[in-house]
Amino acid sequence: MSNYFGAMGTALYSKLSGGTALITELGGTLIWQDVAPDEQALPYVVYSHQGGGPDNQNSHDMRDNLWYVRGYAASRAKAVAIDKQIDNLLNKHTLSASGYTNFWTVREEDISLVEAGPNQVRIYNMGGLYRIRLTT
């Protein structure tokens, strides 16, 4: 079994945390895989696997997956600014995933949500689904 999820988690974190404009927008390296810590102050970024898997078209470990990468903020404007920086780093750029060669990374869907946080405070979530294709 491959170490795909470990390699991709590291690759996405490295790419996002290496983005100076994104880190400035967040006020620090506030980036997590799957879920942010409880009681985490806004703003921050979360990325998670949404679906996909092995392509099974040849003997290589080729992968075609969707990853959901989004920013959370207290205002729509801030969430949009964070999403813009995420997109600048990921859309049509390559990732360095250990053991893999990334040959396709594109944004396929935009997602915008407003959630009710503690005490009904609004939390804005802006991001997108990124199709990431790699092979060994």
Image (cartoon, rainbow, N blue to C red):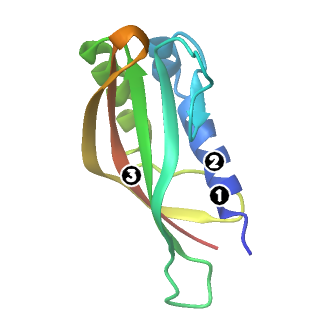
Callouts 1 and 2 close, C-beta under 8 Å: yes
Determine which quarter of the picture holds residue 122: top left
Q: Amino acid at mark 1?
A: Phe
Q: Quadrant of the C terminus?
A: bottom right
Q: Residue at x 66, y 63 (%)?
A: 4
Instruction: Bin the neighbour count of mark 1 within 10 Å (Cα to Cα): few under 14, some 14-19, many 20 and up.
Output: few
Q: Residue at x 54, y 33 (%)?
A: 16
In the image, residue 92 lies at what x, y percent?
Answer: 37, 50
Is residue 97 visible to us here? no
Work out whether mark 2 precedes mark 3 in sequence or the reverse, and give the earlier one: 2
Q: Amino acid at mark 2?
A: Gly
**Front-lying residue, 95 or 82:** 82
In the image, residue 61 lies at what x, y percent?
Answer: 62, 78
Q: Tell me: 82 left or right of 109.
A: right
- Element type at mark 2: helix
- Element type at mark 1: helix
Q: Tell me: 19 left or right of 99.
A: left
Mark pair 1, 2: CA separation: 6 Å
- Element type at mark 3: strand
Q: Is residue 111 above or below residue 125?
A: below
Q: Which mark is residue 5?
A: 1
